Amino acid sequence: MARQKIIIDTDPGQDDALAILLALASPELEVLGICAVAGNVPLAWTQKNALKICELAGKTGVPVYAGASRPLVRDLVTAEHVHGRTGLDGPDLPEPSMALQAQHAVDFIIDTIRLEPAGEVTLCTLGPLTNVALALQRAPDIAARIQQIVLMGGGFSEGGNITPAAEFNIYVDPHAAQVVFASGIPLVVMPLDVTHQVLTTRQRVAAIGALGTPVARAVVELLEFFERYDEQKYGSDGGPLHDPCVIAWLLQPALFQGRHCNVSIECSSELTMGMTVVDWWHVTERPANAMVMRTVDADGFFALLTARLKTL
Ligand code: BDR
Ligand code: CA
C-alpha cells in the first residue's frame, strides 16, 4: 500500500515532539519534510528542537526546514510558561548533529506541492499557521493540489487556553489562520475540545516508561515537564497531548468523531482575537469549510501512541 505523504509544520514544544515521534514511527506515513515555525518559543529554538527529535527517533534522513520567525501581522507571542525556556525542557537531549536544509520552509512547501502529484500531500500543522499562509499567498495555485490540512488549533465549547476566547496556535497568528480557513482546502481540525480529552495520566505515562527504551525514557521526561503546567493550573491528572491528535487521526480516524461545519476566525476584536467561531449548529448560511472534531477514544489514542513508540 502506498504511504500517505505528509509535511509536518511545527513549533516544538513537547507535544509537537510526541506528534513528530508518532509520525516517524508509523510506516503508513512518509514524512517528506518537517518545517519549523515560531510559536511556543522563537524560531531559533523550534528549528533546533525539530532536529533533536529526528535524531532522538534515529531518523536523520528527514529534511528539516526553518520557516517564519514571526506572525504575518501581529507580534510573536510565545509559551515558555508551558514548554520551558527551550520549548523542549525536560530531558537533556544532545545538541543536534543534523543540519537544517538551506531552503526556506515556505519554498519547500510550495515546491513539494507543485512537484508531487496533485491531491497526494497532506499538511499536518502543529503550530501557528504562518508558513502555510505564506505559501498560499505566494503560490495560490498550490491550494487545489493540497490533499488536506490536518491541524491542531482552536476551540469550541472548551473556550481558549491563551485568552478566554482563543487557543494558542490560532491566537499567535490569526491572520494566517484566516487565510487557511478561507482557502477552500479540505480541513480537519483538532480543537481543545478533543485535545483536552487525551490526558497524560500517571498510568499512561508509566506504560510508556515501561517500554524501557532510550526514546521512551526521553518521552517520559518530556511529558513529566509538560504536564506540570496543567496539573498545577487545572488540577488534572496529566496534561493534554494536543498535537499528536493530528497524526493519530491520519493513522486511525475512527478514534475521532466530529462534524463538518463553518469555522471563521476573529481578527478584529482585541477581546476575542484568534477565536475560532464554530457554526456547529449550522445557524448561519456560511458554507462548511472544516471537519471539526469533538470527541476521541482516549484509551485507543494512547494504545496507538505507546505501540508506535515501542518501535523506535
Ligand atoms: C497548542 O499550543 C502549543 O502550546 C501546543 O504545542 C499546541 O500546538 C495547544 O494550544
Ligand atoms: Ca505545537
Image (cartoon, rainbow, N blue to C red):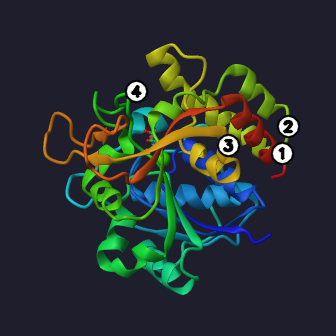
- Three-letter code, disc 4: Glu
- Three-letter code, disc 2: Leu
Q: Residue at x 84, y 43 (%)?
A: 213
Whether the residue carrying mark 2 lies under 8 Å from ligand 1 is answered with: no
Q: Secondary structure at mark 2?
A: loop
* 101 left or right, relative to 272: right
Mark toward the viewer: 4 or 2: 4
**Picture quadrant of ligand 1:** top left
Nearer-N-terminus badge (2/1): 2
Q: Which residue is mark 4?
A: 158
User: Are the residues flagged by discs 2 and 1 in contact, CB closer than 8 Å?
Assistant: yes
Q: Residue at x 35, y 28 (%)?
A: 159
The image quarter in which residue 274 lies: top left
Q: CA distance from mark 4 to mark 2?
A: 33 Å
- Three-letter code, disc 3: Ala
Q: Which residue is mark 3?
A: 254
Mark toward the viewer: 1 or 4: 4
The image quarter in which residue 275 lies: top left
Q: Residue at x 41, y 38 (%)?
A: 80
- Measuring from the top left, give residue 292's x and y in whole percent: 46, 43
Q: Which residue is mark 2?
A: 211
Q: Residues within 10 Å of mark 3 (few under 14, many from 20)?
A: few
- Measuring from the top left, give residue 223's x and y in whole percent: 63, 33
**How many numbered callouts?**
4
Q: Which residue is mark 1?
A: 310
Q: Secondary structure at mark 1?
A: loop
Q: Secondary structure at mark 3?
A: helix
